[in-house]
Amino acid sequence: MKLTRTKTFKAFAEPAWTNNPINMQMLGICSALAVTIQLRTAFVMTLAMIFVITGSSLIISLLRKIIPGNIRIIVELGVIASLVILTDEFLRAYYFEISRLLSVFVGLIITNCIILGRTEGFAMSNPPHLAVMDGIGNGAGYGSVLLSVAFLRELFGSGEVFGYDVIPQSFYDAGYEDMGFMLLAPAAFIIIGLMAWLQKYLSGTGEKDR
Amino acid sequence: MVELVSLFLNSVFAGNILLAYFLGMCSFVAISKNLNTAIGLGFAVVFVLTVTTPVNWLIFHYLLAPGALAWAGIGDVNLSFLRLIVFISVIAAMVQALEMLIDRFSASLYAGLGIFLPLIAVNCAILGGSLFMVEREYTFIESVVFGFGAGVGWMLAIVAMAAARIKMRYADLPYGLDGFAITMIVTGLMAMGFMLFSGISL
């Protein structure tokens, strides 16, 4: 069997592109956009997200047979919150500067609907290896949107990629200017809107809802 | 007093919790389809933010902050790492308690707000309000004003959006732009409008 046809690969690929959490399920946009001014913060946020979603999927999937059905949401929230606290404390201890830039948005991963949705919808009813792949896939799909928004905003907003200047000085001499607008909040909304349009147009499967 | 008014105006307009900090997007996109539901959810958010932000202030400053337990004789304990899990539990508990209180004392208000209250427990604007209150080191009075202002700002944004979406139903949009995409773009334009208020200071 080819790698791309296995169930494990599908658990990863489906959320990462074909059923991407931000554009298609419209979930989890909450905490995503405020950290997209720079690629660096968006990248750390993506790693944090992948860690939390994979870890919580794994733990919930391992415990799925012993968690009583009627208190499962509380158990799920408890697991997610503990992982978020771990991430937050880790960033504070070793990457204080970045943790300052991310400010409250690492903590807000708790209320991110993707994670609770995946633990509730997938990990509760699937074995650990599938749940882990699903978690990584969802984290990667979320990260791809976050990083592309951050790339556009950093490139056009401050002429940099990961903090390195990429627009040559000759451009500035010729009258090119960075778009300050890209660094403001409205730009993120508009970029996300255009990306959702593009993805819906390309995949051609969006349902009509207004 | 002037500072409080200025803090209120800032949290409603220039520092709008939805349009400038992207908090509470999930329910914003889903609920703004209908004007009446948007108004109901807006009031519920104002209510819950105004109550939970000060309550979390008290809990943080008397139980969790570094040295906060000095009144109990254990001043060198720092429990601030617990704040995320404590805040989210407090919010869930407050929402539950509010729901029961409203149900007991006002049937009409319950009919209007009741169904929205459980939704609010997982709204990131509520947790965000409490976390911003800690990060910006507000005093107690400021936390009340900030909670109320943030709620009013969120409500203003969702009600305006719901009104705009009624008009958009008649717009003939290209395939794929309708629904989610145009909602985000209109939100972006609205955010631009709200940013204009950032030049105003008292």
Image (spheres, helix red, strand yellow):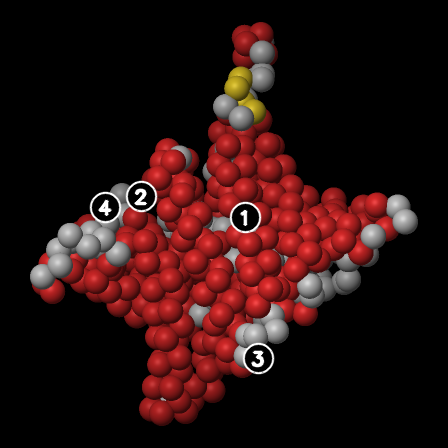
Image point (45%, 53%), residue name: A84
Q: What's the chain of the residue with tag 4?
A: B
On screen, A148 above or below B169?
Answer: above
Element marked by disc 3: helix
Q: Residues within 10 Å of mark 2 (few under 14, many from 20)?
A: few
Q: Are marks 1 and 2 on the same chain?
A: no
Are there few (<14), some (14-19), or many (20+) residues within 10 Å of tag 4?
A: few
Which x, y percent locates residue B121? 44, 70
Residue type at the position of mark 2: Ile
Which residue sits at x=66%, y=47%?
A141
| CA distance separating discs 2 and 4 | 7 Å
- Mark 2 and mark 4 in contact? Answer it, CB < 8 Å: yes
Q: Residue at x 27, y 43 (%)?
A: B201
Q: Position of residue B164 (x, y in %)?
A: 58, 60
Foreground pick, B44 / A119: A119
Labels 3 & 1 near each other (Cβ < 8 A): no
Query: In the drawing, what numbered circle is on residue A51?
Result: 1
Q: Amino acid at mark 1?
A: Phe
**Of the numbered discs in the image, which one, if any, rests on residue B200?**
2
Q: Which residue is mark 4?
A: B202
Residue B110 shows up from this direction: yes
The x and y percentages for residue A76 are: 52, 67
Given the image, on which type of amino acid does mark 3 rest? Gly
Which residue is tagged 3?
A69
Q: Are marks 3 and 1 on the same chain?
A: yes
